[in-house]
Amino acid sequence: MKNIVERFLTYTTFDTQSAEDAGKTPSTDKQLVFARFLTEELKSVGLEDVEMDEQGYIYATLPANGKPDAPVVGFIAHYDTSPDCSGANIKPRIVENYDGTDIVLDAEAGIVTDTATFPELRRHIGEDIIVTDGHTLLGADDKAGIAEIVQAMVYLQEHPEIKHGTIRVAFNPDEEIGLGAQKFDVAKFGCQWAYTMDGGEVGELEYECFNAAAAKIEITGKSVHTGYAKGKMINAARIAAELVSRIPDTDLPETTEGYEGFYHLLAIEGGCERATLSYIIRDHDARKFHERQRFMEQLGEELNEKYGEGTVKVTLREQYRNMREQVEPVPHVIDMAIKAMESAGVSPRVQAIRGGTDGAQLSFRGLPCPNIFAGGLNFHGPHEFLPIPSLHKAMQVVVNIAELAGQFND
C-alpha cells in the first residue's frame, strides 16, 4: 500500500488543469483521465459504492463500523488545478530537513523561492518539503487534499478499533474556475455535513469566504486606416486600457488583505476592432459586493456614453456567496473540526478565506461544508510547496473527525 507522500507524488503526474469558458463539464478532457484513475484507486483501497458520473464527479463510501445511527459525514476535494499556471510535466523534488535558506528551483534559469518574498517557508525549518522545478505549479491545491482523504480511509480500515459512522468521499472537477460544486449531487452524497480539504497552512479552518462574481467585458471598436482615422476610429484595445485604469489601485489583490475586497484582472486581449477583459470581483461584505458589481456596470455605461451605445458590454456571473450564514447555525460542525485538530497536535486558526471553495456553494445547497487545511502554500504558481508533515497532520484530522462523528449525539 502506498504511503501518503507516494500517493501525492503519483497524483502530480496527471495534468488536470481546468479552463475558463469551455462550456462543458469537466472543462478539460484531461481531468477525466485522472478521475478514472482515482475511481479505480478508491475501489482498490476497499471503498464501496464507488462511482464516477459522466461529468467526472466521483463518490464513494467507507461503511460504518460503529454506531448505526451516527451521522453520515463527508470529505471533499477537487482534482483540477488552476488555469493560472501550467500543470503539465510537473517535476516535484523533496527538500530534506529544510534549513531556512532560499530554495533554488532551477539554477540555470535563475528561479528561486526566496525567504524574503515567501517568509512562510521559514515556518517549516527542519521539515521535508516538496517543491517544483520552477516551471509549473505543484498541484497541492488540491491533490494534497485528495491524498489526505484517501490515506485516511486506508488508515481507518487498517485500524478497526477506531469506531466511526458511514463516511462519504467525493472528488470533483473545475473548482478552480468556480464551477466545482455546480453539478455536485448533494442528495446522492447523502451527508448531514461535510468538509472540504482545500485550505493552506496547518491549522487553517475556514467557514467564511468571499462573495464572488466573474465579469466579462466585451468591447467592440471600429477599425479605420490610421491615415484617415480622425473622428472615425474607435480603438477597442485603448478603451480596454482606459477601463483598467479606472479600477482603483487600492482595490486590487496585490494591495488588499484580510476582509478587504478587490477586482482582479484575469486576462486582457484584443486589438483595434475587438477586445475582451475577464475580471473576478470579491468581497466578504454582501453590500460592498453588490456595490462592486454595480461599479463595473457603471464603467460600461460611462464608456458607452463616451464612445457610443453598444461599444462596451459587461456580463456579470455570480460564482458563490459567503458560506458563514449557512455554517454558523450548526456550530458542532466547527467544534468537531477544532477538537479533531487539537487531538492531532494542531493549533486551530479560524479565519476568513481570501478566496472560495466548493463548500461555499454546497453550504447554500443544504450541505454545511467548512474548509480545512490541506497543507500546501503559494498555490497557483511555480513557488507552490508542500511540507510533508502537513500532509500527515491533515490526514490525522480527517481520521479524528471520522471518530468524533461516530460518537456524536445530535
Image: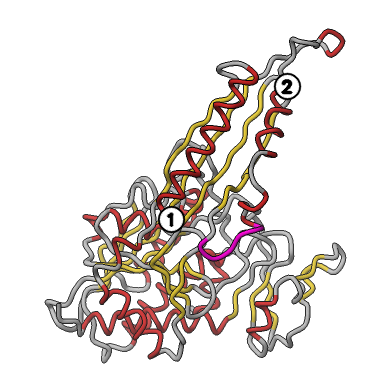
Give yes or no for residue 255 being in the magenta stretch.
Answer: yes
Read off the residue under disc 2.
235
Name the amino acid, label 1. Answer: Asp
Instruction: Determine contact: label 1, label 2, CB under 8 Å.
Output: no
Relative placement, left or right, of 181 versus 332 is right
The correct choice, above or below, for 203 with respect to 271 in the image is below
Instruction: Give the magenta part as a residue range.
Output: 254-259
Residue occupied by mark 1: 285
Near-viewer residue (167 or 244): 244
Out of 51 and 267, give the one closest to the viewer: 267
The residue depicted at 74 percent of the width and 14 percent of the height is 233
Q: Name the secondary structure under disc 2.
A: loop
**Location of residue 237 (image quadrant):** top right
Q: How many residues crowd around disc 2 within 10 Å: few (fewer than 14), some, or many (20 or more)?
A: many
Kindly report the distance in space between the C-alpha atoms of the residues bearing marks 1 and 2.
36 Å
Towards the viewer: 346 or 55: 346
- Left or right: 251 with respect to 371? right
Which quadrant holds the C terminus? bottom left
